[in-house]
Amino acid sequence: MFEIDPALMATSEALGDLALSHVRLQNDARFPWIVLIPRRALATELENLAVGERDVLMEEVLRAGTAVRAISNALGRTATKLNVGQLGNITPQLHVHVIARRTDDAAWPAPVWGVGKADPYGSDAMTIAMAAARTTLGL
């Protein structure tokens, strides 16, 4: 049975479900950031997905990229670069990070992991970010 790792639940808000993945908005206002979690029990690596599912996940990554750009625009901070990562070193459940970056963000040009402390969205910004993501993703 598919369950979301508690570590992912604790740091993000649910946006909805795409064909393969549960979609979450990372609660860090420094970086518009979506996490895709394929709804497959015990999946920890891309190789745990069937060939067709890998194709679906790639399309969902592209859609999430469009969504984090929409979040950036809605919040008045146009993204100049997208970062995509599937690490799983700390949280082994298969999940993919899609992050909008700017040359003036808190971590640029380094990766976002381990840089500073998360800055949770305020309620208005969270509402704006979630609406932009859901509209763009059709959720």
Image: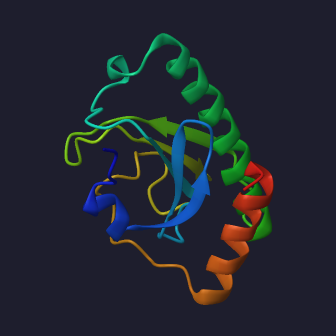
Q: Is residue 32 visible?
A: no
Q: How many numbered discs?
A: 0
- The x, y position of residue 87, in whole percent, is 31, 36
27 displayed left or right of 15:
left
Q: Name the residue located 22 percent from the left edge and 41 percent from the top edge.
A: 92
Q: Name the residue located 33 percent from the left edge and 72 percent from the top edge.
A: 117
Question: Observer-nearest residue: 111 or 44?
Answer: 44
Quadrant of the image occupied by residue 46: top left
Q: Can residue 118 be seen in this view?
A: yes
On-image quarter of the N terminus: top left
105 displayed left or right of 46:
right
**Residue closest to the far bottom:** 123
On-image quarter of the C terminus: bottom right
- The x, y position of residue 38, in whole percent, is 45, 38
**Residue closest to the far front:** 1
- The x, y position of residue 50, in whole percent, is 44, 16
92 displayed left or right of 76:
left
* As drawn, 75 above or below 24: below
Question: Observer-nearest residue: 84 or 139?
Answer: 139
Q: What colour scheme governs how the chains and residues are painted in the rendered image of this protein?
A: rainbow
**Residue closest to the far top:** 51
- The x, y position of residue 114, in whole percent, is 28, 57
Q: Name the residue located 52 percent from the left edge and 64 percent from the top edge.
A: 14
Q: Name the residue located 47 percent from the left edge and 69 percent from the top edge.
A: 28
Question: Observer-nearest residue: 78 or 60?
Answer: 60
